[in-house]
Image (cartoon, grey):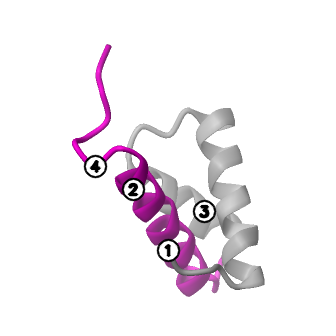
Amino acid sequence: MNELTDGGFEMLRAAVNAVRQLQCQSVKVLKARLLLAFPGREAEINEAIQFWAENVRQRHPSGIPTN
């Protein structure tokens, strides 16, 4: 897994908080919220979302279980 830049880490933290607080149900909605809150930081937002997605794929190679 690649390491995050400082800006990417900041956006990852913001993304996790947004999902928890705003109950974002899709990546599209999450990205839109982050772009509104952090204009001009699309590259760092994309980096954070990509990092998070890679992490989930590594932890759940067969998909996320739906209990």
Rounded to the nearest whole Å, what is the CA distance between mark 3 and mark 2?
A: 24 Å
First in sequence, mark 1 or 3: give its number: 1
At x 71%, y 45%, the residue is: 17
Rounded to the nearest whole Å, what is the CA distance between mark 3 and mark 4?
A: 27 Å
> Can residue 38 be seen from the camera position used here?
no
Q: Which residues are magenta?
A: 38-67
Q: Are marks 2 and 1 in contact (CB under 8 Å)?
A: yes
First in sequence, mark 3 or 2: give its number: 3
First in sequence, mark 2 or 1: give its number: 1
- Determine which quarter of the picture holds residue 35: bottom right
First in sequence, mark 3 or 4: give its number: 3
User: Where residue 10 sits: x, y (%)?
Assistant: 76, 69
Residue highlighted by disc 1 = 1
Image height of 66 relative to 57, above or below = above
Label number found at residue 61: 4
Label number found at residue 34: 3
Residue highlighted by disc 2 = 58
